[in-house]
Amino acid sequence: MKITIQYKLFMSMLAATVLVIGYMGVVTQWSFDKGFLEYIDTQEQVELELVATELEAYYAKHQSWESLKQDKYELFSIFAKTLPEGRKKRYLQKKIRNKELPAWMNDKEPPNDKKHPTHPLERTIILDEFGLLFFGSQRGDALPNLRMLTFEKQEIGAIGLYPPEFFQDSHQLLFVKKQKLIIVLVALAAILISIGLSLPLAFQLTKPVRRLSAAARRLIGGDYSTRVQVTSNDELGALSRDFNTLAETLGKTETQRKQWISDIAHELRTPLTSLQGEIEAVQDGIRQPDQQTFSNLHQGVSRLNRLVEDLYDLSLSELGVLSFYQEQIDFRALLADEVTARQNDAEKAKLRLLLDTEQKPLIISGDKQRLQQLFNNLLSNSITYTEQGGAIEISLHRDNSNMKLDIMDTAPGVPDEALPQLFNRLFRVEQSRNRSLGGAGLGLAICQQIVTAHNGTITATHSPTGGLWVQVTLPLLGESS
C-alpha cells in the first residue's frame, strides 16, 4: 500500500507527540510520586517529634525505659496520644483497650526485611541510652536519621523513622489514583489535540507538493505554459520558483527547437531550390550546360556543404566532443597571416582592412585550425555586412595575463535588440535571408564555441566607427621574449 507524504508527515508528528507526552507522563509521575513521598515523610517527621517529646516526658517520670520495654501497650498508647483527633486515634485507642496489638509488634513474628512496612509505627525504631534497639526492626545495615532523646541535657536514647517507600494510606492511594487519572486524561487530550492539528497541518504543508506534482504532469504532457503559485518563502516556495524557472526554460528550449528545425529547413531549402531550378532549366533546354551553369551548380553545392559542416561543428561543440589539438601558437603571427589572406576579399568589397598589433609574439595554447576558423568567420562577417567604402579595424594587444582582439567595422550597425542574439544559432540581422548578404547565421555561434573551448570570452557591442565591435579575450600561455 502506498503511503503519501501527507500521511507520513502526519504519522511522524503524531509519533513525536505521543513520545513526548509519554516521556513527560513518566517523568511527571515519577516526580509526583517522589515529591509526594517526601511530603509524607516530612509530615511523619513532624509527628515523630511529638512522639519524641512524649518519650522524653515518660523518661523524666520513670527515670528508665524498663517498664516501657516490658509494656508495649504503654508504648502504643504514647503513639496514640500524639495523633490528632480522628479515626486513626480512635482506632488505636480501641486496640489498646482491647489489649490487641498488630502482628508486626508481636515478638513471636520475626521481622521480614522483604516486606514493605506500611504503618509509620512499623518503620519506627527506638534506642535506649546504651544505643540498643528496644522497639522496631532495623532494615538493612543503615539506620534512619535519628532524633536524640535527652533528659537534663543527657542523651537517654534516640528515635528514628524510615522514610516511606510507597503509599499505604487509603486517602493517599485515592489521591494518587486521581492524580494518575488526571495525567492520563491530559495525555489523551494532548494526543487528540495533536491529531486534530497534525492532520490539517500535514495536508496544508503537502499542498504545494501536490500542486507541483500536478504541474509536473502537465509539463510532461507538453504544456510549457504551466506555472505553480508561490505562496511561501521557505524551501517549498524556493522549489516552486525553481519549477517555474524550469518550465520557462523548457518552453524557451522547445520554441528554440522548433525555430531551429524551421531555420535549418529554410536554410537547406533555399540552395536546394536554386540547384533544382538550375538543373531543371538545363533539362528543359532553357539553359545550356556551359561553364556558367556549372559554376552556379558548384556554388550551390559549396553553400550546402558549408552549411552542413557548420551545423556538424556546432553540434559537436555543444555536445562537448568537438576536437581541439592544443599547441603553443603565436596568436599575433596567426592573425597577421589571416588578415593578409583576406586583403584581396576586402579590396573586392571596396573595404580597407587595417591591422594594429604588438611587435612581440603573443603565445597562447590553442588549436591552430580552429583559431583560423575563428578569424575567418569574424572577418567574413565584417566584410560581408560592411558597406562599400568603409573600413575594418583590427587591433591586438596585451592586457595583463590575457590578450584582447578587437574587430571594429563601419556602418551599418546592429540594432540594440539584436546584440544579445548575435551568437545564437541561425540568427541573422538580415531577416530577409537574402543569400547575397551572407551565410546561414552560424558563423558567430561557432566563434563563441571556439572561444569558450579556449577558456576565453567573446562579446559584441556597438562600434564607435558606426558598425559592430567584436572583442575576443584569450588567456596568454606566459611571458614571451
Image (spheres, rainbow, N blue to C red):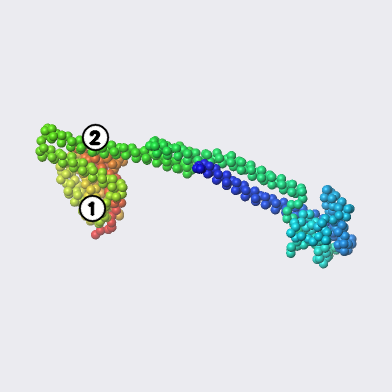
State the image coordinates of residue 80 (x, y, percent, origin top left). Answer: 84, 53
State the image coordinates of residue 470 (x, y, percent, origin top left). Answer: 26, 45
Work out whether residue 319 can be spotted: yes
Work out whether residue 382 can be spotted: no
**Residue drawn where x is 83% and y is 64% of the image:** 128
User: Picture quarter containing residue 189?
Assistant: top right
Mark 1, secondary structure of its residue: helix
Q: Say what amino acid the circle numbered 2 marks.
A: Ser
**In the picture shown, does residue 368 fall above or below 287?**
below
Q: Residue furthest front?
A: 1
Mark 2, secondary structure of its residue: loop
Give whichever of 203, 256 is nearer the camera: 203
Give whichever of 421, 63 is nearer the camera: 63
**Crowd rating for badge 2 (residues with CA inside 10 Å; few <14, some 14–19, many 20+):** few
**In the picture shown, does residue 333 fall above or below 466?**
below
**Residue drawn where x is 30% and y is 51% of the image:** 455
State the image coordinates of residue 59 (x, y, percent, origin top left). Answer: 87, 61
For the C terminus, the quadrant is bottom left
Give whichever of 331, 123 is nearer the camera: 123
Q: Are marks 2 and 1 in contact (CB under 8 Å)?
A: no
**Residue drawn where x is 57% and y is 44% of the image:** 14
Q: Residue furthest bottom?
A: 130
Q: Which mark is residue 368?
A: 1
- Identify the residue under disc 2: 432
Q: Which mark is residue 66?
A: none
In the picture, measured across the screen, residue 41 lies left or right of residue 410, that is: right
State the image coordinates of residue 312 (x, y, percent, origin top left). Answer: 26, 45
**Residue drawn where x is 28% and y is 41% of the image:** 425
